[in-house]
């Protein structure tokens, strides 16, 4: 695959983690580890259906035992830690490698009280912005989107350019 294609392609990792959150979110409230009502809407129907099929066959456990569970627990831990930070007066939040993370849209405090920055590769962020417009009807105004190419830019430079 050429660098040009990679440069303009959104992250498969972002889609994969969104699928894990989506599948976990389909479980009954008492059984799921994490919950993200938007996760399913970030991935294509074909990819989602294929992964769900192979997950039902146990392929994920055979290929990488514990990976799905780790990713679900990781999501829950981040949510719990964020809730703690919010209760302690968090003022700014930087989500590095935001991918298809939906915390900025799931936590009410992040919509009103906290300055949120989502940092990611320009191609992944562009794909996410298209999906957000489809989900919410427009780009959510309470988030500052920070596209960055780490091969040419620094995190501090980009964040400060975006009012961090």
Image (tube, grey):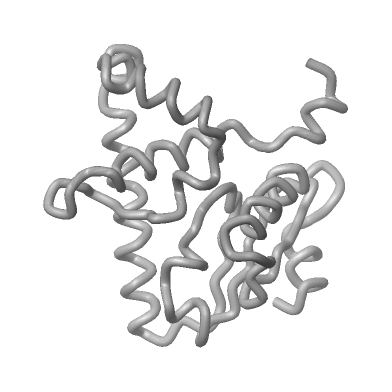
Q: Foreground residue, 104 or 91? A: 104
Residue for point 26% across, 17% down? 58
Residue 32 place in picture, x, y as percent: 21, 47
Residue for point 63% across, 68% down? 117
Quadrant showing the N terminus: top right
Q: Is residue 20 above or below residue 54?
A: below
Quadrant showing the C terminus: bottom right
Residue for point 64% across, 65% down? 137
Corner quadrant of residue 51: top left
Corner quadrant of residue 80: bottom left
Q: Would residue 101 appear left or right of 97 to someone viewing this image? A: left
Residue 85 place in picture, x, y as percent: 38, 76
Looking at the image, the residue that sits furthest to the left is 30
Residue 102 place in picture, x, y as percent: 49, 58
Residue 113 place in picture, x, y as percent: 51, 87
Q: Is residue 116 above or below residue 119?
A: below
Residue for point 76% across, 43% down? 123
Q: Would residue 105 appear left or right of 54 to someone viewing this image? A: right
Q: Would residue 157 appear left or right of 90 to someone viewing this image? A: right
Number of marks in picture: 0
Q: Is residue 140 above or below residue 54?
A: below
Corner quadrant of residue 2: top right
């Amino acid at each position: 695959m050429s660098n040009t294609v990679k440069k303009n392609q959104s992250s498969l990792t972002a889609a994969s983690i969104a699928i894990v959150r989506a599948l976990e979110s389909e479980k009954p409230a008492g059984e799921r580890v994490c919950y993200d009502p938007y996760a399913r809407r970030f991935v294509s129907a074909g990819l989602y259906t294929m992964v769900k099929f192979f997950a039902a066959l146990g392929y994920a456990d055979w290929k990488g035992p514990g990976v799905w569970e780790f990713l679900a627990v990781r999501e829950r831990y981040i949510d719990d830690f964020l809730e703690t930070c919010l209760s302690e007066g968090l003022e700014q939040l930087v989500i590095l490698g935001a991918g298809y993370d939906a915390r900025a849209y799931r936590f009410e405090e992040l919509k009103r009280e906290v300055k949120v920055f989502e940092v990611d590769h320009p191609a992944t962020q562009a794909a996410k912005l298209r999906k957000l417009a489809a989900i919410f009807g427009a780009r959510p105004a309470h988030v500052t989107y920070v596209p960055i190419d780490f091969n040419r830019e620094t995190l501090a430079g980009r964040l400060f350019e975006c009012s961090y």
